[in-house]
Amino acid sequence: MASVPEIIPHPTEASPKQVGCTFQYPARLNGCAHIDVLLLDAENRQTLACMRAYARTGLEVGAVACESEAWWAPSFRSRWCSLGVAVPDFALDRDAYVDALLDLLDNCPARMILPAHDGSIEALRARRMEIERRVALPLASEAALDIAVSKARTLMLAAELGMAVPRSFPVVDLADVPAIMSEVGFPAVIKPNQSWVERDGVGQRMTSQLVLTVDDAKARLADVFAAGGQATVQPWLPGRREAVSLFYAHDRVWARFAQMSHREFPVMGGVSVMCESIPLLPEIAEPSERLVRAINLEGCSMVEFRRDREGRPVLMEVNPRMAGSVGLAVSAGVNFPELTYAWAMGESLQEVTGYRIGQRLRWLAGDIWNLKCAFDSQGEPDVLPRRRALATFLSDFVLHPDAFDRAGAGDLKPVLAELHKSVWLHAMGRVRRAPAVRWLTRNRKVQ
């Protein structure tokens, strides 16, 4: 029996009631209004950026979050959210998640559904035919996705195309780690073969990890193996991080956008917290197009590079979905969400021929965490000295005040919800665990 999704309409005068870990506003499932776009993963930045982009064109937009994230999901707090829905977590029960989506689509029809997370994409792929009988799903073909989600297959194809790829050493046994690390050297990177892995019905997102010792490498690899994944060891590259986002459909590239990352969270290999639009440099733009064409990766994708010690761009990976920093592209003049909707609806596509250079986008909650990482991880690669990290963090408020998403100027509740969850609650937890506070709390109870 399908799990009935919990409907969370955009609040007006009603006050939310906390039910478990979700917020529920009074509503009935039957009689739900038609939704043009149903955005999944309401806790993600790209979901909020897409919601704002679609709402500005007059589309009705709804959002979905897993029950564990619904209580704080920024998109639910947006003024543009017509409908918010909490469903079972795909990481814990993939079938219950899809069943709830199908039930929702049967009761609240939508024209397009758009996932933003590797885990939700994999859940939809497992039952793609059922989803596509009800709604347009703008994903590449299964053959293309099989290559794109596999870092090993992507790098192999890229090497065949003549692209620079990192030296990669697959690890199948922890006993081989000392020999591999002596070949790679330190610092090194443990890179999972797939970002989303599952074991015994439980899913988990895996990210690249920096390692500085053999024991550290063994521990990180053991974590990947325990989650059901595979991994390779690659040398750490010290250069600039760049990426090219493309929209490819009907054997043609309709939009191109290049960016560089100034700061990330986690500091090594994480998502960009301060990024900037850059020109379409031939050494990254042309290989990106060749790779996307070779994969036949239709839709929106991002090809990521990092420069080596000689300044040569080396392919890191391909993400076959809307990037977390898609808000930067939209603000610079490349509306990937609009292209995605037009493609899904079978409408004519218009090529984007240019965009603004030097546009910046800052993710404040992530940047605060980047600063914390800098203070906690001194001496590690990519980590600035504390004073310089703090000075950069503070000076960017003055030097780049326009880096904050201007589309959110009249839509502040999502930002406040994210800061409350990601920063304030964490800080208060640290304060409550402080020895002095614990002592005062115990003595107050005694009195």
Image (spheres, rainbow, N blue to C red):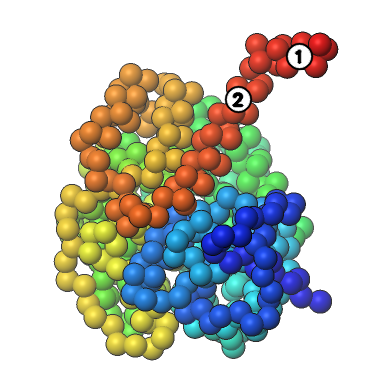
Q: Residue at x 16, y 54 (%)?
A: 357
- The number of numbered discs placed on residues in the rendered structure image is 2
Q: Residue at x 65, y 62 (%)?
A: 25
Using the image, determine if residue 59 lies above or below residue 440. Answer: below
Using the image, determine if residue 425 lies above or below residue 88. Answer: above
Q: Tell me the amino acid under the disc marked 1.
A: Arg
Coordinates of residue 133 in the picture (x, y in percent) = 59, 88
Coordinates of residue 58 in the picture (x, y in percent) = 37, 76
Coordinates of residue 29 in the picture (x, y in percent) = 68, 76
Q: Which residue is mark 2?
A: 430
Q: In this view of the protein, which residue sits in the foreground, 69 or 322?
A: 69
Classify residue 177 as left or right of residue 276.
right
The picture quadrant where one finds residue 177 is top right
The picture quadrant where one finds residue 193 is bottom right
Classify residue 319 as left or right of residue 241.
right
Residue 444's mark? 1
> Local crowd at mark 2 within 10 Å, few (<14), some, or many (≥20)?
few
| Spatial separation of the CA atoms under disc 1 and disc 2 | 19 Å
Can you see residue 438?
yes
Q: Residue at x 58, y 50 (%)?
A: 72
Q: Tell me the amino acid under the disc marked 2.
A: Arg
